[in-house]
Amino acid sequence: IIACVGQQNVEGKRIPCGFRDRTLPHFTKDDFGPESRGFVENSYLAGLTPQEFFFHAMGGREGIIDTACKTAETGYIQRRLIKSMESIKVRYDGSVRNEMDEVVQFLYGEDGMTAEYIEDQDIELMKISHERLAAIAKHDYLNPDYGRGWIKDEKVRSNIRMDHEIQAVLDREFENLREMKRLLCTKVYRDGESRQHIPINVRRLIDQCHYLFPAEEDPDFYPPQEVVQKVEETLDRLRVIRGLTDEQVLGWEAQHNATVVLQAHLRYHLASRELLERDRLGQRAVDWLLGEVEQRFEKSLVAAGESVGTIAAQSIGEPATQMTLNTFHFAGVGSKNVTLGVPRLKEIINVAKNLKTPSMTVYLQPDYASDDAKAKQVQSELEHTTLGKITSYTQILFDPDVRTSILEEDRQLVEEYYELPEDDFDSSRCSPWVLRIKLDNSVMIDKKLSTRFVGQKIVEDYGGDVQCI
């Protein structure tokens, strides 16, 4: 708008010659300057010259045609997606099936949660160190100052110090937390990524508790062991799969897999010492909080009859409408020569046999991956090399004398070759026409090829029809 509009493109190239040897009649023939090939040096503020305006319109017209074609393409893709998946629904047993009752997923999304109630949250249990975890969650009841300031009732404090059963309950709570941390870090999220999709934002609910139940209105506190018991009972009721019996091993496995991350998240935030010492929640607040956790969990379970197939189809179709039909972002760059956008989506959905630009990522063994030369060698052996790729240029020459050459640079080579001719060589069969192929040295070195090897391959292919020097 202010500096300059810049280069206009049609099909990813500069403006082509529409007239004979020129783009517009405004320019002389064979003018390859920036202005004549579509560079607009004016800004919108200054205004475009007539020829700049024409080029700008040519570039814009391509975009309009592209949009019109794209709408039809993506509309049809979306229709086919919906038609193929519209029968896929969630059943009353939590599984996802089609109209033939074939199982697509045993549990929707592997956790049975619906996307509306899921949000990105940090699983703090993964980030926290073991020492810090012990400092905030472990009940150090052997310390004489234990509970001072947050356990108001002296009798409760002395009970915890004396009663081994209560101590066992509190120790088990901390051990469960440590086990959950170990499980998350070593089995579930090995990459250490602590930001995950979980329903129920507990931190927000605790903040709400402070607002709804101020400390002066909620003076009675639960003893720590009762908080642990209530939290355990609540977590026990968070069932994704209902009505499981003891012998349904796979059902329990699925239940564990679906809720393990949420359980870890809840156990950390609902640790008894956290709720009582840091958050100072009274009885009413704890009861409301646990009730709210359970209610939010029920709410976030996917409803039976949900048309998840149609939702999936629309979730693919919607971004497809925003794709560009023809992508010229990497035009002319060999390494980035890949099919993108709508054409690629069509290939995937149609399961196309012949891809426009087939590509493959090859992961090398450790000893090859660390050595540049070895990796290059593997690439050369894997890559399909044609004669065209290693040829710099070709010439057809009329050279009637077989035993020498009309080209000064080739003469010595040809003469030396015929000093010791092969036994079955018949000069009368040789044509006066010579096909001279100049090989590209840099490509030959890169691919570790020799001229002798290339010559052998040509002779193998054409047999006695060619004499290769």
Image (cartoon, grey):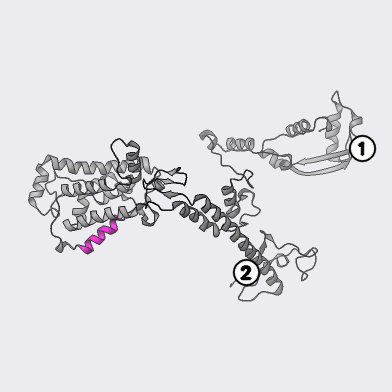
Q: Image point 18% across, 44% down: which residue? A: 170
Q: Tag 1's secondary structure? A: loop
Q: Amino acid at mark 1?
A: Pro
Q: Give the residue at the far front of this rendering.
A: 100
Residue 457, image x, y percentages? 74, 32
Residue 338, image x, y percentages? 61, 49
| Res. 169 image quadrant | top left
Image side of residue 42 versus residue 125, left or right: right
Residue 456, image x, y percentages? 76, 31
Q: Give the residue at the far bottom of this rendering.
A: 46
Q: Is residue 403 visible?
A: no
Name the disc covering residue 400, or none: 1
Q: Earlier in the sequence, mark 2 or mark 1?
A: 2
Image side of residue 452 versus residue 421, left or right: left
Q: Image point 38% across, 57% down: which residue? A: 116
Real-space CA distance between mark 2 and mark 1, rounded to the nearest whole angstrom: 59 Å
| Res. 277 image quadrant | bottom left
Q: Tag 2's secondary structure? A: loop
Foreground residue among 31 and 233: 233
Q: State the extent of the magenta-drawn residues as a range.
A: 201-212
The residue at which mark 2 appears reads as 5
